[in-house]
Image (tube, rainbow, N blue to C red):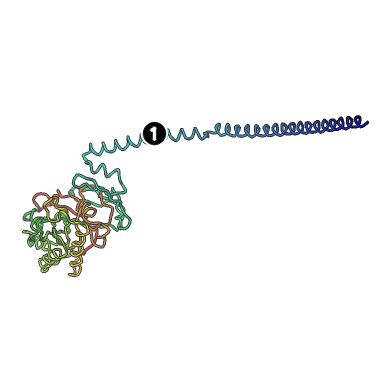
């Protein structure tokens, strides 16, 4: 009897196990079915999204849009084409300037419109154009050469009034100042003297008195300049005193000028001067002139106001810029522009420097 009971219990346990197994397997099957349904729904949703995206892309392409890969390919193609066109344009510009006789420096300057390019000693120097200094307002085509060789203003600013002038020294010899006046010259800057480039001896210009007296007698306003080779403020003061003594008897209405130029010689006494040393000389000269009651001015070329001095440091003084040719290659304010060294004026034999003045010194 006990054995029968045990057998029944064992069969009951097995039946229970079978039921549990069936239930478990059923649950697994249901879960698998549910997962399959979820995956099917998800796939269907993804397919709809993919179809929508593709449809949008097809629509964009139909309207002229590009895929990212296509756009990148187009950009690279345009970049290569632009670089090639730019190179060809630069080569053509340089070639044209050289063929026109503009020279290498002029061609290089055209490539760097935001900088002043200076050639010196076989090298090129680049100086960014700054807004720390007032710029002149002239456009490249505001000036043109007249029939008499004088520069004329053809811009549209009615406030601009220019006066024609010359600067002279013993190199012009004896001058017929009456004929010069009748030729339309309004002012003359006469060299008072110079300091030697090697020994440093100061000399009075041989024609100083004749030129000053001849110009004033014929109604021409006169200023004077001194070719400086001063090394320091002591020598600069010596140069100023020499000038003040020379001009004391005369009515000098135009500026008293310090001529700052590189002697272009390794043996010149100023060959190794720094820009700071040049500026000390210039400021000593100009401040002394001002204290004596005259208008001080600095004469120089583009190199003078970049390599020899920093234009920002001497911006407080009147400026006489030397640049030959049109348009003027100097961005900053100026008062007198020496635009040629090969001018011709009645009453003077040979070449003479021609200038225009845009500041009223009368």
**Can you identify the residue that label 1 sits on?**
81
- Estimate how packed mark 1 is, as few (under 14), some (14 to 19) or many (20 or more) residues with alpha carbons within 10 Å: few
- Name the residue furthest right: 1
User: Could you say which is closer to the camera, residue 185 or residue 232?
Assistant: 232
Q: Is residue 250 left or right of residue 134?
A: left
Residue in the foreground of this view, choosing between 302 and 148: 302
Q: Going by the picture, which residue comes out furthest to the front? A: 2
Secondary element at tag 1 = helix
**Location of residue 8 by image quarter:** top right
157 relative position to 5: left or right: left
Residue sitting at x 76%, y 31%: 29
The answer to which quarter of the image holds residue 166 is bottom left
Q: Position of residue 317 (x, y in %)?
A: 24, 62
Q: Position of residue 154 (x, y in %)?
A: 27, 51
Question: Depth check: 267 or 205 in front?
Answer: 267
In the picture shown, does residue 218 fall above or below 116?
below
């Amino acid at each position: 009897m006990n054995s029968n009971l045990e057998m029944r219990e064992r069969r009951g346990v097995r039946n229970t196990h079978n039921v549990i197994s069936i239930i478990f397997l059923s649950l697994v099957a249901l879960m698998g079915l549910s997962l399959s349904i979820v995956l099917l729904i998800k796939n269907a949703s993804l397919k709809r999204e993919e179809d929508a995206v593709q449809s949008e892309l097809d629509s964009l392409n139909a309207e002229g849009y590009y895929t990212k890969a296509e756009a990148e390919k187009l950009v690279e193609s345009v970049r290569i084409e632009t670089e090639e066109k730019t190179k060809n344009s630069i080569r053509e510009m340089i070639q044209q300037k050289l063929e026109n006789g503009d020279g290498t420096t002029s061609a290089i300057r055209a490539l760097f419109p935001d900088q002043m390019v200076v050639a010196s000693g076989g090298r090129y120097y680049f100086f960014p154009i700054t807004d720390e200094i007032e710029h002149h307002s002239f456009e490249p085509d505001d000036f043109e050469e007249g029939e008499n060789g004088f520069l004329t203003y053809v811009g549209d600013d009615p406030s601009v009034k220019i006066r024609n002038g010359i600067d002279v020294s013993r190199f012009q010899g004896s001058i017929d100042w009456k004929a010069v006046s009748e030729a339309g010259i309004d002012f003359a800057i006469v060299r008072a003297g110079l300091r030697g480039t090697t020994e440093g001896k100061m000399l009075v210009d041989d024609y100083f008195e004749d030129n000053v007296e001849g110009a004033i007698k014929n109604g021409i306003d006169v200023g004077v300049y001194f070719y400086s080779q001063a090394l320091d403020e002591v020598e600069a003061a010596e140069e100023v005193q020499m000038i003040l003594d020379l001009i004391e008897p005369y009515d000098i209405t135009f500026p008293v000028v310090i001529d700052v130029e590189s002697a272009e010689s390794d043996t010149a006494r100023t060959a190794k001067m720094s820009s700071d040393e040049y500026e000390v000389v210039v400021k000593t000269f100009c401040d002394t002139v001002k204290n004596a009651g005259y208008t001080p001015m600095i004469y120089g070329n583009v190199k003078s106001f970049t390599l020899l001095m920093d234009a920002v440091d001497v911006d407080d003084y009147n400026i006489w810029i030397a640049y030959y040719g049109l348009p003027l290659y100097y961005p900053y304010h100026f008062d007198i522009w020496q635009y040629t060294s090969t001018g011709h004026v009645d009453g003077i034999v040979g070449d003479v420097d021609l200038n225009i003045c845009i500041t009223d010194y009368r």
